[in-house]
Amino acid sequence: MTIVVGADGSVASRAAVEWAARRAERTRDALVLVTVVDDGWGSLGESALVELRATAEERAERETDVARRIAPEVEVRGVVAVGSPILTLAEASRDADLVVVGTHKVGYFHGRAMGSRSLQLAAVAASPSAVVPVTSWRGRSGVAVGISEGRESDEAVRFGAVEASRLGEPLVLVRAADGDDVHERALERAAELAAAVDPDLQLDVRSTGGDASDALIAVTRRAVLTVTGRRVASRGFLPLGRTNSDLLMNLAGPVVVVPQVAVEAVLVGWSVA
């Protein structure tokens, strides 16, 4: 299995590299650090690209060394590409089990925010995508999953259950809605899906009122990992939606966005010891 990380040498990128390296150390996944020279949609001249590529190769080597120091037993390699960072990482996600990027978007923001690269990648990645802020990891507990109606969060629940079992953490099922029959059935279904992954998981079911994004943002301040689902259109592009957009713009801990069709790659070959 492979984890792809966007590594551009920034502080936010370093947070993603370190987080991915620690995860790969536990899972024994291979780690591919992708450094992209942004060619401005083909507007840069050849001499500028040569200079930028040389700088990118130095950054890639530096970030690869960081990952190897954190996870010396993990296979780590660096890749330098030229093009659009988001399109390059989205393409790499087709052959990855997880794609990881860092973010500095931790301010309070609600509404449309299509300028953020982490949002753009989460909306188009073929694999689950992790968005990692620069933050403290101390005092955190639990893997939280946002629960929606129907089957929209099924893959997110399964992904979260696998992560909780790997980490030895409780699985926190969070649903923001009124306590009607639909609400209760959604939580019951999520609990059943989690138990099918690992019947020994410790479950913490939380019902909250108010806005779903506000509830999940609050959870990211304490959780080891927060997981949310993403609907996938049968044809064309389907936006992330307001809940996921607000969450990724205001997160205080790592968030994984799981597309409906991507979780099978995470579950294949994995079983609870």
Image: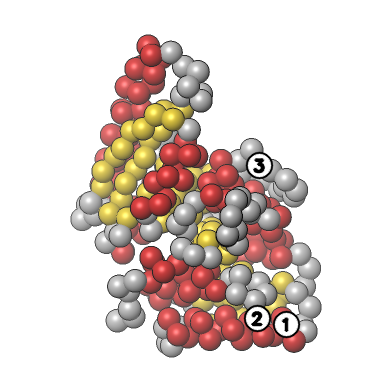
Label 3, residues with CA under 10 Å away: few <14, some 14-19, many ≥20: few
Q: Amino acid at mark 1?
A: Val
As measured in the structure, the alpha-carbon distance from the residue carrying label 1 to the one carrying label 3 is 31 Å
Quadrant containing the C terminus in the rendered view: bottom left
Q: Are marks 2 and 1 in contact (CB under 8 Å)?
A: yes
Label 1, residues with CA under 10 Å away: few <14, some 14-19, many ≥20: some
Give the number of the disc on residue 266: none
> Which circle's residue, 2 or 3, is located before the other in the chain?
3
- Residue at image x 55%, y 84%? 191
Disc 1 on helix, strand or loop?
Answer: helix
As measured in the structure, the alpha-carbon distance from the residue carrying label 2 to the one carrying label 3 is 30 Å
Count of numbered labels shown in the rendering? 3
Label 2, residues with CA under 10 Å away: few <14, some 14-19, many ≥20: some
In the displayed structure, 39 sits above or below 27; it is: above
Q: Amino acid at mark 2?
A: Ala
Quadrant containing the N terminus in the rendered view: bottom left
Disc 3 on helix, strand or loop?
Answer: loop
In the displayed structure, 91 sits above or below 97; it is: above
Task: From the image, tell me which residue sits under label 2.
Answer: 186
Residue 113, image x and y in percent?
Answer: 69, 43
Disc 2 on helix, strand or loop?
Answer: helix
Residue 154, image x and y in percent?
Answer: 55, 74
Q: Amino acid at mark 3?
A: Met
Task: From the image, tell me which residue sits under label 3.
Answer: 114
Q: Does residue 60 show up? A: yes
- Residue at image x 73%, y 82%? 182
